[in-house]
Image (cartoon, rainbow, N blue to C red):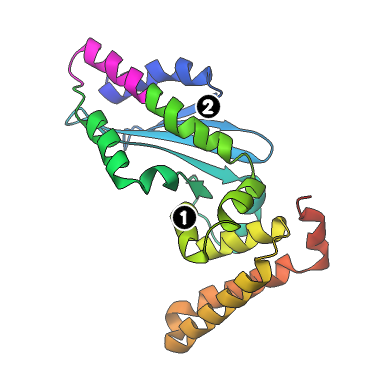
Amino acid sequence: MKLNKQIFNSLIPILKNRGLTESTYSERSGSLSFYKSNKHSNYQITLELDDTTKGFVNVYGRISFTNVIDILSRFIELRPNVYEAVVVNYDLYKNKEKYNKIFDELESLPLKTDLDIKEFENEIISHIDSYILPFFEKFPNAKSVNDEILNDLSKEEYANYIPGQTNFKVLIIMKLCNSSKYIDFKEWALSAYKKGVEINATKYGKDYEILQRLISYLENEDFNNSIID
């Protein structure tokens, strides 16, 4: 049995006890993914291993919100069968010294014997318990992202926490949460995208058109029913 598959099978029951009841193993990439979800939120933990060198590559958690992705997918063609994250655990990554130390220690663990593998699995679970599950608990829904990130940080920092189509996701979250920052952010985005079109219409024209359509959708009277109380 491949090393990755062996570790995957060992972690399934442990992470099920922590609420991650679904899991997938990628034969192509060798990555292991574990999921939990509820009506509003989807949580994913991914563990990447190099089956050739028999070593650790990465482990990370990501969160997606159904209401945000449902709206985004009306305007952006999302890749099929690809997890579209709304928020990532940048609070861990921004402390580079701490982050590097944690991952250097995981990378240094040998994966040659059964005892090595058992110790590695214990360290991965410890990492998940210490850093990923608390991250999941901190952001149970889109409103928590609005309150903890969008309200507290400058717009220049948003992309660190909200990857891919950041500005569209931010507008959706702000409008869903009836944020007082929505108008200012909308006006900034319209101005910035318009300047982009003036510089290179071919490159930025489509995004500007999507932005305008998204704003029209968010500001339609019917959207008021979607606002989170």
Residue 19, magenta (yes or no):
no
Q: Is residue 48 above or below residue 206?
A: above
The quarter holding residue 89 reads top left
Magenta extent: 111-124
Q: Residue 80 at what x, y percent from top left?
A: 50, 49
Residue located 46% across and 82% down the image: 196
**Residue picked out by circle 2:** 22
Give how far across and how far down residue 76 sits, in percent.
56, 62
Whether residue 107 is visible here, answered yes or no, is yes
Image coordinates for residue 129, horizontal then vertical, percent: 45, 25
Q: Quadrant of residue 174?
A: bottom right
Q: Residue at x 57, y 38 (%)?
A: 138
Q: Is residue 16 above or below residue 74?
A: above
What quarter of the picture does the N terminus occupy?
top left
Which residue is pictured at 51% across the width and 32% down the height?
A: 134
**Element at badge 2?**
strand
**Type of amino acid at the residue the image marks with label 1:** Pro
Res. 57 in view: no
- Judge left or right: residue 226 versus residue 29: right
Q: Which mark is residue 219?
A: none
Q: Is residue 109 left or right of residue 31?
A: left
Q: Using the image, tell me which numbered label, if any, was put on residue 163.
A: 1
| Amino acid type at image mark 2 | Glu
Furthest-top residue in this view: 115
Residue situated in front as seen by the camera: 220 or 229: 229
**In front of the other: 130 or 128:** 130
Based on the displayed image, in which of its 4 quarters is residue 175 positioned?
bottom right
What residue is shown at x 59% (from left), y 72% (from top)? 211
Q: Residue furthest bottom?
A: 198
Using the numbered discs, state the Cα–Cα distance from disc 1 to disc 2 in whole angstroms.
24 Å
Residue 25, above or below 89: above
